[in-house]
Image (tube, rainbow, N blue to C red):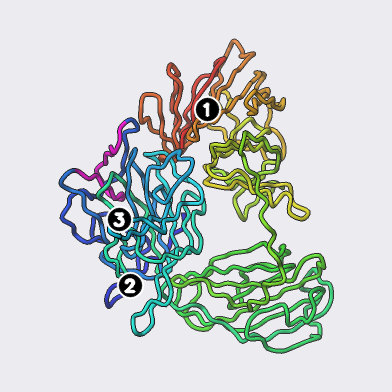
């Protein structure tokens, strides 16, 4: 989770903090109710509605309303354009909401397993109200997908908000916008105009700034890790830029460095069009950018062909080939004032459309484009190619996955299917299994592991089928990354963490899979001399049930099934465990003999190997 700069705008002063501390309630206005307090953690009762308990300490904001105390919470400071993110936890059946400027509500709700979410479900934009003469609701917007996790789990919300605009007379000239809302990694809304305050605002009168408000009168909810970045500051500006164009097909800077330019001149913005042709050229741009305040700036470059970018003589991006739709991003510390920028591009691939785009986002401002609009028009975006799961679907493709505990060891970083810049590994023998209840998973045939599960749409297959493709697909929804390591090991090796990269792991042999009468796969493989039948089934869009039948178990059996890894594993009920700081639940069958072992900062939940091992994954 990134650490943002917190710019709190008061009436007359601006002060900075990295994150919102939750040592007390000082950030919020004092209210009459006592339903809000600071704690160290929160837990819920999975069998009862609206039940949440807090643990003594600091760092977590908890709302537990009762008949007498049901107040909302408002921030002391007011915000205009702002990015805000936070973790939150819902009790069973609970309802709350997070309001931008106290007027525009992003709904927080226990919507776990809801198949057709409405504006009242988690991540929805609650409806506006009018009386004519009875109450009418209108303009509510449901989330694109239901990315809500189970109650009692920590969920992550990111909101990018643009305040309404007003002219000098106070007349509204532009509606407020939700530039983006992301829940648990799934995009719920983009560039959504808000025509007016949603239900339950602090005022029906819109304004340039306003406080955050959290609804506290409906049900228990907890928050942590508030991170706020004001976006009211001035943007970076740049130009004019001098340019030199050298014609030719170049793979390295040394091939054109020092050569006489075929064209020279100045341009107010970066654009490939100064080359006067679409291919076989190199361009060297030089100019200055005005940096309004010192801080960390995010630089994003999108270019067809090769490009090198330096700021103040420091290399930001090396000379590297990228496809037209690829983006490179980096964070750079810049002092206030003028900074020297140099961009070198070279294009020799005639089959690619020309493209140059450069954006700079400041610590307190939205991204500013330093390129001309026309410089990004030659590439026509392809329509996305999606694959639905209206019935059980089994699909083979490469799959790039992010693993919670992927090692940084050189032995892995040098592997061809590990990408250090993204921290992902490519599963080359992956099976994607989709279900009409919008719950899907990836199975790794190279080690017999479930690598990831997700909620929402099934697959974006554009990377596989668009143009030449690279053989991969991508999940469409909220992804829960798992560890993707072999489940069955000897007890002595329970903490061994060896992900398969280019080939199956030792003492493992895949035997493919069969489809049952419902069309879902039953995976078969040999592990440590044992024969395994691994059957996964989706239940009601909420849980993934896994059942293993194991044969040829050695008489001197000292093997275990590693059910889950985590930095922290806690029992929440007799047979239910919260994994890795409440990222997901594991529910074991009655009669199982689970144990938790710990080594350093890693815990393992495991059971002895037997002829039948079953559990449910809930998230």
Q: Nearer the viewer, mark 3 or mark 2?
A: 3
Taking the image as drawn, is residue 284 in sight?
Answer: yes
- Range covered by the magenta-colored residues: 48-66
Point out the residue furthest to the bottom here. Answer: 265
Please say whether residue 53 is one of the residues in the magenta stretch: yes
At mark 2, the secondary structure is loop
Task: Give the numbered dot on residue 545.
Answer: 1
Secondary structure state at the residue bearing disc 1: strand
In percent of the image, x 70 and y 84: which residue is there? 243
Residue 107 at x, y percent in the picture: 38, 52
Neighbour class for label 2 at 10 Å: few (<14), some, many (≥20)? some
Labelled disc at residue 207:
2
Q: Residue furthest front?
A: 133
Residue, x 68% and y 63% (percent of image)? Answer: 381
Q: Main secondary structure of the magenta part?
A: strand
Give whichever of discs 3 and 2 has the lower sequence position. Answer: 3
Nearer to me, 580 or 493: 580
> Which of marks 1 and 2 precedes in the sequence?
2
Q: Is residue 76 left or right of residue 141?
A: left
| For residue 584, above or below residue 594 | below
Mark 1 or 3 closer to N-term? 3
Which label number is shown at residue 135? 3
Secondary structure under the numbered disc 3 in the rendered image: strand
């Amino acid at each position: 989770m990134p650490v943002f700069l917190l710019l709190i705008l008061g009436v007359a002063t601006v002060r900075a903090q990295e994150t919102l501390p939750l040592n007390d309630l000082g950030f919020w206005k004092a209210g009459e109710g006592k339903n809000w307090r600071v704690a160290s953690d929160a837990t819920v009762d999975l069998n009862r509605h609206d039940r949440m308990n807090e643990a003594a300490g600091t760092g977590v904001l908890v709302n537990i309303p009762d008949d007498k105390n049901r107040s909302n919470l408002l921030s002391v400071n007011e915000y205009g354009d702002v990015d805000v993110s936070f973790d939150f936890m819902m009790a069973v059946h609970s309802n709350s909401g997070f309001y931008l400027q106290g007027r525009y509500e992003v709904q927080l709700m226990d919507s776990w397993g809801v198949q057709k979410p409405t504006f009242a479900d988690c991540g929805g934009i609650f409806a506006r109200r009018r009386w004519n003469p009875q109450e009418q609701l209108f303009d509510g917007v449901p989330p694109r997908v239901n990315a809500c996790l189970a109650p009692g789990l920590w969920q992550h919300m990111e909101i990018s908000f643009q305040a309404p605009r007003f002219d000098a007379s106070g007349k509204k000239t532009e509606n407020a916008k939700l530039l983006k809302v992301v829940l648990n990694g799934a995009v719920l809304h983009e560039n959504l105009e808000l025509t007016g305050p949603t239900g339950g605002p602090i005022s029906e009168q819109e304004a340039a700034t306003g406080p955050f408000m959290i609804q506290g009168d409906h049900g228990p909810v907890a928050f942590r890790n508030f991170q706020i970045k004001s976006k009211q500051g001035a943007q970076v500006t740049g130009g004019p830029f001098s340019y030199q164009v050298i014609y030719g097909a170049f793979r390295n800077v040394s091939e054109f460095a020092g050569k006489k330019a075929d064209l020279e001149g100045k341009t107010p913005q970066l654009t490939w069009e100064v080359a006067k042709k679409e291919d076989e050229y190199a361009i060297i741009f030089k100019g200055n950018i005005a940096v309004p305040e010192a801080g960390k700036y995010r630089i994003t470059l999108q270019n067809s062909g090769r490009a090198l970018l330096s700021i103040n003589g420091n290399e930001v991006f090396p000379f590297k080939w990228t496809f037209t739709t690829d983006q490179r991003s980096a964070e750079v510390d810049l002092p206030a004032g003028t900074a020297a920028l140099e961009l070198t591009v070279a294009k020799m691939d005639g089959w690619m459309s020309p493209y140059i785009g450069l954006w700079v986002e400041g610590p307190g401002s939205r991204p500013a484009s330093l390129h001309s609009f026309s410089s990004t028009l030659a590439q026509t975006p392809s329509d996305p190619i999606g694959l639905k799961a209206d019935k059980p679907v089994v699909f083979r493709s490469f799959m790039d996955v992010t693993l919670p505990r992927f090692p940084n060891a050189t032995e892995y970083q040098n592997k061809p299917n590990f990408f250090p810049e993204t921290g992902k590994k490519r599963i080359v023998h992956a099976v994607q299994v989709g279900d009409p209840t919008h719950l899907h998973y990836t199975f790794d045939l190279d080690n017999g592991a479930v690598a990831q599960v997700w909620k929402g749409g099934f697959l974006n297959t554009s990377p596989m089928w668009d143009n030449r493709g690279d053989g991969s697909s991508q999940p469409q929804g909220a992804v829960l990354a798992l560890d993707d390591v072999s489940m069955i090991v000897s007890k002595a090796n329970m903490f061994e963490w060896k992900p398969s990269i280019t080939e199956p792991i030792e003492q493992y042999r895949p035997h493919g899979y069969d489809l049952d009468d419902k069309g879902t796969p039953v995976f078969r493989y040999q592990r440590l001399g044992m024969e395994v039948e691994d059957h996964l089934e989706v239940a009601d869009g909420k849980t993934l049930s896994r059942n293993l039948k194991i044969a040829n178990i050695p008489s001197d059996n000292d093997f275990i099934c590693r059910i889950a890894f985590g930095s922290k594993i806690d029992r929440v009920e007799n047979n239910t465990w919260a994994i890795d700081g409440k990222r997901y639940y594991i529910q074991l069958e009655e009669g199982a003999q689970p144990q938790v072992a710990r080594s350093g900062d890693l815990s393992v939940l495991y059971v002895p190997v037997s002829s039948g091992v079953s559990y449910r994954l809930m998230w």
